[in-house]
Image (tube, grey):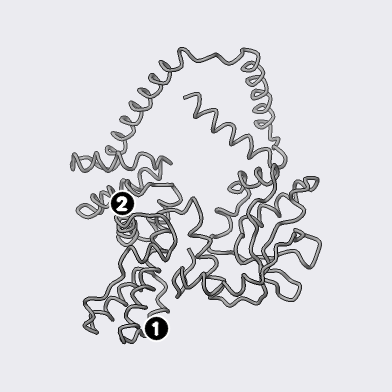
Amino acid sequence: MSVTTQSAGEARALLEDRLKHRQLVMLPIDGDTAAPTTGVQGRQPGTSTAPAELAELISSIASVGLLQPILVEDLGGRHRVVAGERRLRAMRWGRAHLADNPHFREAPALVVPGPLSEEECRAWQLVENLARDDLQPAELGHALMLERSAVLAERLTEAGVTVPAEVWAVEDPVRRWSVLDRVRRDAGAHGLGAPWDVVLSRVGIQLGTDKARQIVRAFATLPREVSTEMDAAGVALATRLEYLRLDRGRRDAAEAIWAAVRARGAPRLLRGAVQAALDDPRLDAEEAVQAAGELQQAADEARRRANSAADDDAPTVEESVVAGCVEAMDRLLEQLRGGAVVAGYTGGTIVLHARELVRRLQ
């Protein structure tokens, strides 16, 4: 999530005039001075911008084209990406490796007059991030804390309280809120605040106030690196709140359990392990994770039995289809084991099909 000194509402207002002059054009991906260029926008290369992590996006573009335009600024005929780094990197990969696919030759782009200021770029990235369906709890907590600080700052200013300029130099959103809250208390403005309904309406997302408080509590309490790791592992908010219950009284135990589930590559065991440690404080981290794993296995087995019973009356897949699939997979694996590689984006498509097969066969 990009850091900005402005609220999401101000971000939209800031960009409104620029966007009045936007044009939707098709920009070449390479071989032309008009081809868009980009730096890194918040996420480091090698994670979400690596080809392996872009497989689904590449596969989608190859099939139906790029559906969401990138946003670029026009710098006198040169085009710099403001939002849409992953989309552009996927397009570039496809252009380099799937040159015959027409979907990778040009990218739909909203072009606005440049140069944009750093604040305008950050404002747009904030707006786009908040529109993402896959926004993780730590990213959302970051955005909510920034917006809450912006609301409080506005209310202080309207009440005649001077908000020091150095407040906006504090990039950490939790610390920024703390500094602003101290300004409020020092000014005796105890009746001023930043109501969650106002914050949420300005951010422009559908979220209950209780849920917003829980997200911010988890974000503000967990160490930042743990929040980031949990985002990457897809750990749900409810699990983070359970983790905080253990962390408040037995931080060493909580940290050891998180390290143990990460070492196993099994973040889904976190909640069960935390619950086991809360129920029996004598358990060490490995024992808690083991207990969670056994419960998960029992639950999976019960689910398989239930699915099996439900499938008794289901039609059976044709034997010829199953046999052909197994034969094709055997040949594919034999070549992969011999060092061959799957060309192009097809590898990502195979991964998607394999994941669905595993899910449906369990």
Residue placed furthest toward the front: 20
The residue where tag 2 is placed is 255
Q: Residue 319 versus residue 246: which sits nearer the camera?
A: 319
The three-letter amino acid code for the residue at tag 1 is Glu
Q: Residues within 10 Å of mark 2 (few under 14, many from 20)?
A: some
Q: Position of residue 40 (x, y in %)?
A: 59, 64
Q: How crowded is mark 1: few (under 14 residues within 10 Å), some or many (20 or more)?
A: few
Q: Residue 82 versus residue 327: which sits nearer the camera?
A: 82
* Residue drawn at the location 41% of the way across and 58% of the way down: 140
Cα–Cα gap, marks 1 and 2:
34 Å
Quarter occupied by residue 331: top right
The circle drawn on residue 8 is: none
Q: Residue 203 versus residue 52: which sits nearer the camera?
A: 203
Q: Where is residue 101 in the image (x, y as percent from the top left)?
A: 77, 45
* Residue drawn at the location 64% of the way across and 17% of the way down: 321
Kindly state the secondary structure of the residue where label 2 is placed. Answer: helix
Quarter occupied by residue 165: bottom left
* Residue drawn at the location 65% of the way across and 23% of the way down: 330
Which one is closest to the eye, mark 1 or mark 2?
1
Q: Position of residue 158 (x, y in %)?
A: 34, 82
Is 102 situated above or below 201? above
* Residue drawn at the location 50% of the way across and 23% of the way down: 361
The circle drawn on residue 166 is: 1
The three-letter amino acid code for the residue at tag 2 is Glu
Mark positioned earlier in the residue sequence (1 or 2): 1
Kindly state the secondary structure of the residue where label 1 is placed. Answer: helix
